[in-house]
Amino acid sequence: MAELREAVIVDFVRTPFGRASKKRPGFFADVRSDDLGIAAVEALMKRTKVDPYAINDIIIGTPTQIAEQAQAARNITLGAGLPFEVTGLNVDRACGSSLAGAHIGIMAIQTGMADIIISGGIESLSHFPNPVITPETDVLALARDFAARGNPNPKMIARVDPDALMGMGITAENMADMFDISREDMDQWALRSNLRAAAAHKEGKLKHEIIPMEGKLPDGTVALVDYDQDVRPDSTIEKIRTLPPVYKPDGKVNAASSSKESDGGAAAMFMSRSKARELGLKPMATVRSIGWAGCDPKIMGYSAYLASKKALERAGLTAKQIDLWETNEAFAVVPLTLIKLFGIDPERMNVNGGACCIGHAVGASGIRMVGTLAHEMNRRGSRYGLASICGGMGQGTAILVEREDYWDGRAAFLGQ
Ligand SMILES: CC(C)(COP(=O)(O)OP(=O)(O)OC[C@H]1O[C@@H](n2cnc3c(N)ncnc32)[C@H](O)[C@@H]1OP(=O)(O)O)[C@@H](O)C(=O)NCCC(=O)NCCS
């Protein structure tokens, strides 16, 4: 087999993440999630100025492939005005869907099967909310109600505790017990997440990745929004400590230390290093390795650790060599577990906040990990970065990237 080519990421954009809540509808409650995907792809095409005919595939991740999210990739390709020749591919690996989609695109580039791939993800949790599962929930009855969205096989249910299959909060409680992460640790992490994200918004650190979009404000007016709706700059530890456990009466996980349910779309452009050079585009980072791994669904968040470990091993690097980490705060216990098991300096993890407040627009979150990471690595001049995301039913996904001093060229995200 011919030698593998290098794949680089040249740009990443996302919509603001809007709140998905029946009680307090968010910016994008009335917006189709594939329209959020179209907005991301259009912005990427505009910023990179790549010839649309040169795009070899558009890969879109979401685990909820129904209604507007069914056949999302082809819908987004055509909706964004790309030529009929550009194909679309839908990917589902639960919360890791869009990062798994990026894996496919990266491997196609590395093996010479493609030159340029757009890889993104979408989700409207306003339209397709996740049920909150506690020990009192009759999960099997719920699964049957969910028949339109899935119909779990009884053979699988016989193997795996059904609460852990669908009750993501319960898996976070299991992890906190298993890895001895306290409620106070998770509360402090949730606070930090909010304060970091609020500061990042204020300092304009997320402006290269967030595309301003029209959204409906709580008073019903429509305005351009360029921030994530669930970030609470006024968070205090005193208030967080008062929040009741959500998933079991004596539990440790509350609304602050859980990810926020969100609506959003995101997309990144990957290409071969040689194509980037030919186009005069300056990469944000080069992909050094990818990893994916499964674990017992009852501690699904642990899968982010396992996938990261695989990516490190494949790259021949140690955790100590990683300058910056991004992992999805499906629950605060996930970054805290990675910090504990890898011995990471917390100052290198989720430096601009995470899903506890930015939100978890499930299909879009995976690609946000590597895109947000690459932008921050460019801001700081970091060398190695590792992005990961855990996923429902115990499946983690990771990408390890390196930022180098590239040739002089146009940085798509700066429009230069
Ligand atoms: C946890 C969850 C059920 C909470 O939903 P909710 O009750 O609608 O959440 P809210 O935003 O209304 O927050 C509940 C309370 O916590 C408070 N709160 C949440 N985060 C806070 C913070 N950082 N600081 C202070 N208060 C906070 C809210 O203000 C609210 O208080 P109030 O009732 O006094 O207004 C929901 O966010 C959820 O399901 N998250 C997990 C999603 C998931 O499992 N995804 C898959 C992962 S793999």
Image (cartoon, grey):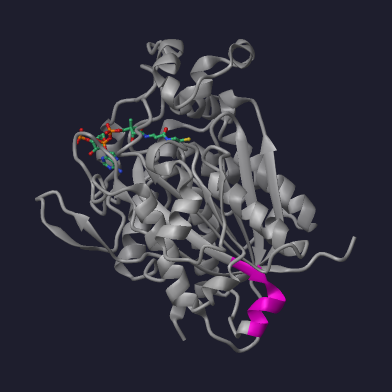
Residue closest to the eye, 128 or 313 = 128
Outermost residue toward the right in this view: 1
When the figure is inspected, residue 60 is found, relative to residue 139, above or below; the finding is: below
Q: Residue at horizontal 52%, vertical 72%?
A: 52
Q: Residue at horizontal 38%, vertical 43%?
A: 68
Q: Is residue 302 visible?
A: yes
Q: Main secondary structure of the magenta part?
A: helix
Magenta span: 270-278
Residue closest to the eye, 104 or 251 = 104
Q: Is residue 351 visible?
A: no
| Whole-percent x, y for residue 5 in the image | 77, 68
Query: In the picture, which quadrant includes the N terminus?
Result: bottom right
| Whole-percent x, y for residue 237 in the image | 30, 42
Query: In which image quadrant can residue 307 be found?
Result: top right
Position of 144 with respect to 380 (left or right) is left
Q: Residue at horizontal 60%, vertical 85%?
A: 280
For the image, the number of numbered tags is 0
Q: Residue at horizontal 46%, vertical 11%?
A: 140
